[in-house]
Image (cartoon, rainbow, N blue to C red):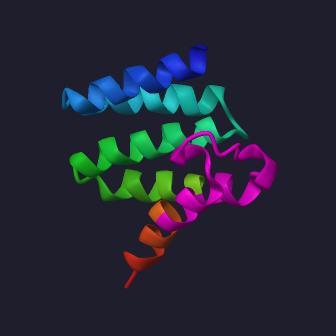
């Protein structure tokens, strides 16, 4: 319940364009949910907050963490109840995006 609340708070801050608050809520949630799909979700929210501010260095750090979490998560961690809980979502929406954005 606490993790879902943290994700909702981060999303609300993003929607309100409160980037730093979104990043703070997202990274706190990611740190509290290590080794889960929720960690990936939270990291994606932090990435979006940094992207809105065009903070490339922080985006790169979050990208690296997202890649590692995605690599380390077993297939069984993705329960498929929503897009964000499908392994293919993370591959096609995020990992492929990261790969294509490289020169």
Q: Is residue 73 above or below residue 98?
A: above
Residue 85 x, y percent position in the rendering: 61, 44
Specify whether residue 64 is in view: no
Describe residue 71's horizontal placement relative to residue 89 as left or right.
right
Does the magenta-highlighted stretch encompass residue 69?
A: yes
Classify the position of the N terminus by image quarter. top right
Q: Is residue 25 magenta?
A: no
User: Vertical placement of 40 versus 33: above or below?
Assistant: below
Q: Position of residue 37 (x, y in %)?
A: 64, 41
Q: Position of residue 78 (x, y in %)?
A: 70, 47
Total numbered badges shown on the rendered structure: 0
The quadrant in which residue 72 appears is bottom right
Asked if residue 4 is positioned above or below residue 93 in the image, the reply reads: above
Q: Residue, x 35% and y 29% (percent of image)?
A: 11
Which of the 4 image quadrants contains residue 71?
Answer: bottom right
Residue that protrudes farthest toward the bottom in the picture: 103
Query: What segment carries the magenta color?
Result: 67-92
Name which residue lies at 57% across and 53% down: 66
Outermost residue toward the front? 81
């Amino acid at each position: 319940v606490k993790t879902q609340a943290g994700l909702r708070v981060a999303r609300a801050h993003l929607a309100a364009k409160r980037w730093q608050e979104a990043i703070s809520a997202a990274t706190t949630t990611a740190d509290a949910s290590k080794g889960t799909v929720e960690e990936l979700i939270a990291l994606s929210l932090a990435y979006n907050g940094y992207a809105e501010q065009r903070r490339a260095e922080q985006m790169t750090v979050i990208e690296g963490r997202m890649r590692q979490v995605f690599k380390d998560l077993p297939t069984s961690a993705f329960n498929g109840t929503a897009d964000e809980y499908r392994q293919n979502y993370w591959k096609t929406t995020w990992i492929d995006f990261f790969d294509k954005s490289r020169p």
